[in-house]
Image (tube, helix red, strand yellow):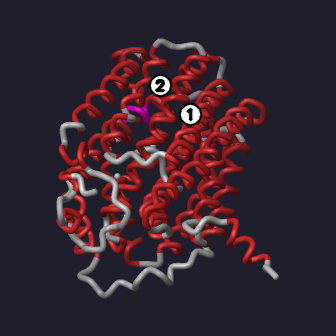
Amino acid sequence: MTSAADTRRLRRPAWAGRNYSLLTAAAFITSLGSQGALIAAAFAVLETGGDGGDVGLVAAARTLPLVLFLLIGGAVADRLPRHRVMVAANALNCLSQAAFAALVLAGEPQLWQMMLLTALGGTGQAFFSPAAEGMLMSSVKGEQAGRAFAVFRMAMQGAALGGAALGGAMVAVTGPGWVLAADAAAFACAGALRAFLDVSHIPARGRGGGMLADLREGWREFSGRPWLWGIVLQFSIANAVVGAADAVYGPLVARDHLGGAGPWGLALGFFGAGTVAGAVVMTRWKPRRLLFVGTLCVFPLALPSAALAVPAPVGVLCAVMFLTGVTLEVFGVSWMTALHQEIPEDKLSRVSAYDWFGSVALVPLAMALAGPSESVFGRTASLWGCAVLVVLVTAAVLCVPDVRNLTRRTKPVAGGTPDDAAGGGGPAAAVGEADAVRGGSTS
């Protein structure tokens, strides 16, 4: 007679183990809350009389500590049990969002208060992201890794779809405070799930030379791979300009031309629907030259900024956002697969930290300059500038041979140096492969 536990194991694919299932459920919950919170934070600033510059300052306040603490977060995540780092970060995010919600619901929050609380949230994210990425990649193995990442991202992006649409509607009906409160509750639930993660399969690290030695080792792993630092450099610019367009100019265009928070939330929801569709595609499609194909799919990331610059009608904007979501998800799954197959497990969080650091380093500057740029050049010209920069940096990274030639393998690298991947041909010789994020995150 088959037990209930046996039945559950039969229904679950072999690659979807306990850790993977917990991580996927937790990511679904936090994505559901966070997408609505992004909209709520922007409109909380606008409802207190703030302008585009104030929205940019609040957004930059979240990203600045993310940049400052990411490298430390990666080193910590490779030293301590990753699930404990993730739970502590979720607790900080929960408390900061709850306080933000209380201020908004109580009256008119001051700009400095909103900046401080979003900065605390960014600090939590700095420690969470490297630990989460390392934990996810260590939870899957073998040739089904790409499918596992696609299913994970499909769940996460499906939640983002519902969260963006629901968040925009809730902001319009109930105001931003309750959306922020729901996000705080989501962090609490996700942290509780992550507390049950099992890290016994991860070998304990021996005593090393300290934090600086860990950072240097991670840097050697990162800088020795042209495909890795080339794409991170690409996204340091792309994420900055797209982040400014989405977080600052998007809500302003929505307020002035599209009808407010509801239509903007709908457009973000269509982006989420596109990412779900892209993830579905990637559960079946395994491009051989995965980074080449993935990078080609980054070019459409310029389209939303162009649509906002026109500005395009809501229907056209939604279609553009959907297409962008599909193609960006192809990149996101390809990127995660490349990291999984090329980076040794004991260095995943540190390499992920350098990846995240480079990808978000310019975002605070772009957010802070979005308002002044609008004043000097105008909103339309600033948005067209965002679109052009995305195209230029994406074309440039295709000049890196490893980006064009790195191919999919079925077994992850076991060694500890970039040269280990080159045995018998290396990435550039075609051996045999994200979030806004580089295509998304695992938060």
Q: Name the residue under label 1.
A: 271
Does 265 appear above or below 94?
Answer: above
Query: Can you say which quadrant of the picture contains the N terminus?
Result: bottom right
Q: Name the residue under label 2.
A: 304
Q: Are circles 2 and 1 on residues that touch, CB within 8 Å?
A: yes
- Give the left or right position of residue 280, taking residue 367 as reference: right
What residue is rendered at 52% in x and 51% in y?
150
Q: What element carries label 1?
A: helix
Point out the tag, 2 or 1, that comes first from the N-terminus.
Answer: 1
Does 90 appear above or below 4?
Answer: above
User: Residue 265: horizontal and vertical position, in percent?
Assistant: 64, 31
- Give the left or right position of residue 151, taking residue 405 as reference: right
Does 375 appear above or below 420?
Answer: above
User: Residue 50: horizontal and vertical position, in percent?
Assistant: 55, 29
**Residue type (three-letter) at the residue carrying disc 2:** Pro
What residue is rendered at 33% in x and 41% in y?
235
351 or 332, which is in the foreground?
A: 332
Q: What element carries label 2?
A: helix
Q: Main secondary structure of the magenta part?
A: helix
User: Residue 92: horizontal and vertical position, in percent?
Assistant: 56, 63
Q: Does the magenta stretch include residue 318?
A: no
Q: Magenta part of the protein: which range?
A: 240-244
Does 303 appear above or below 280?
Answer: above
In the rendered image, is residue 360 in sight?
A: no
82 or 226, which is in the foreground?
A: 226
**Residue type (three-letter) at the residue carrying disc 1:** Phe
What residue is rendered at 33% in x and 66% in y?
350
User: Residue 191: horizontal and vertical position, in percent?
Assistant: 62, 66
| Residue located farthest toward the right when viewing the structure as drawn | 1
